[in-house]
Each structure stands twice: as structure tokens, then as C-alpha cells.
Amino acid sequence: MTFLHCVSVANMRESDRRTIENHVPSLTLMYRAAMGVYRAAEWRGEIAVAAGAGNNGGDGFALAYILKSRGVACRVVTLGDRLSPDSAHFAERARAAGVSAAPYRGGAFAGCGTIVDCLLGTGFHGAVREPYASAVREINASGAFVVSVDVNSGMNADTGEAELAVRSDLTVAVGCVKNGMLAPNALAYMKRLVVAEIGIVPVREEYRIACEWREEFAARKNILRCPPYLDTRVIDTRDVTYEGARP
């Protein structure tokens, strides 16, 4: 029987920290996450990567670097300039590879065939503020194929609640499914959800999602039924290395 982990944001954050301290460099984890997104989607049309601040934007820059290095043209639309050290690293790698990056302006996603949502991460809660709110609305109205990385921007990853959030065709959860992704409200924002397994082991078990349901699981509160939008075929990038990783 195969199960997928479903965890809280706090659990995921602590698990990520311990993995970096004891097992895998943070740059390698970010690169693996981006590689999982690259493998999960079919890349078509003009591609725009919407990159927010912090590590959320870092995933976007790492993906842009991977796309460009594999001959797939893309550009980055930035919101916020507060990049983490890892994000700044991949921003420079993308720039050196020839990826263009420009601050968000109205109309930035016009004509796109694919938009990657790396705006707001799992730590987000509350209301989406400008200029992010305008970017989310524009993404939702674009008609493009939308890929959200780790969580749909604007969604509370613990509860699934959202006043305004990106509506994606594909969401790639990094490491584990987050609790809010299985909330009833999540279905309004996600058409398909997959997991990129990058080598993070949860520090504690919370819930397990049964890839094949058995009636005996109904009495076990920690085993959840797999929703129809969750693809149980995990994208495994644990064997991916990154030559630029710091020890």
C-alpha cells in the first residue's frame, strides 16, 4: 500500500530546515524543486515565470534557468526585490543564461501560453496585497496554462482558505502535500495536484493519504482519502544534483 504524506506548514518548514542542516544543501533542494516542476508540465507557447520575493521567487528563477538551459525560451516577471541568498544565486544563473527579467506591470502576461506562479509561498495568510493582487487577477484572466509551485499564491496552505488566489491547471507540491490542499475550498483553485519528492523527510507524521482506499481506513483518523485532483504518481528528483551547491 502506497501513502503520501500530508503535513502542516510548520512541520514542512522544520523538516526543510533539518534536511538542509544534516543532509542536502539548500541550493540543491531548490534546484530539485524546480526540476520537479520542469518534469511535471508540458511547456508550450510564450512562458512567463511570475517570481515573488524570498525563496518563492527563487524557485521561479531556478526553473527559468533550467528551462533556458534546455532550450526552452522563457522570461521572468518580478514582484518584489527582496531575494534570499539562494534566490539571488539562481537569479544570477538565469540572467547569465540569457533569461530576461522585468518588474511586473499591467499587461505583463498578455499573450502567454504558460504562466508559472511563484508569487506567494506556504507561509502566506490573510489578504493578497498589491501589486500581487493585480498580478493574481491578471494570471486568472489570462487564459494561459497556469502552473503553481508548492501552493497556489493567495491560498492558506494550512486551511485552504483564500479571498483571492491563483487558479491553476497544475499545482506542484514540493516535498509533501500541505493540509490546506485537501480542504474542500482547494478544489476551486486546483485542477491537478502532483508532488515533487526532493528528499525532505517529515520530522513527524501527521496525515497519510491512501493512494488506494480501503474501507478499513475509515476508522483511522490519520489516513485520508485521495481526492480526485491529486495525481499519486510522484515526481522523484532525489537523484538530481546541482553543481553550484554550497557545502
Image (spheres, helix red, strand yellow):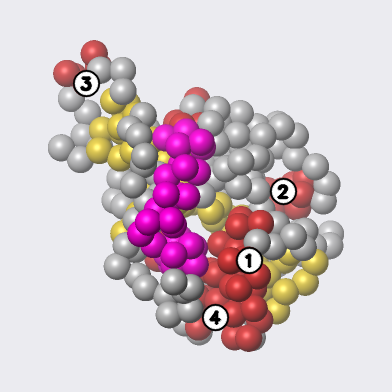
Mark nearer the N terminus (1 vs 3): 1
Residue named by callout 3: 217
C-beta proximity under 8 Å, tags 3 and 2: no
Give the distance between the C-alpha atoms of the residues marked 1 and 3, in whole angstroms.
44 Å
Magenta residues, as a range? 7-35
Mark nearer the N terminus (4 vs 2): 4
Residue 68's label in the rendered image is 4
Q: Secondary structure at mark 4?
A: helix
Crowd tier of the residue under label 2, counting other residues whose Cα lies within 10 Å: few below 14, some 14–19, many 20 or above = many
Residue named by callout 1: 85
Q: In the image, residue 77 lies at what x, y percent?
A: 72, 66
Amino acid identity at mark 2: Val
Give the image quarter of residue 226. Answer: top left
Crowd tier of the residue under label 4, counting other residues whose Cα lies within 10 Å: few below 14, some 14–19, many 20 or above = some
Mark nearer the N terminus (4 vs 3): 4
Give the distance between the C-alpha atoms of the residues marked 4 and 2, in whole angstroms.
24 Å
Mark yes or no: residue 220 visible: yes
Amino acid identity at mark 4: Lys
Q: Is residue 13 left or right of residue 143?
A: left
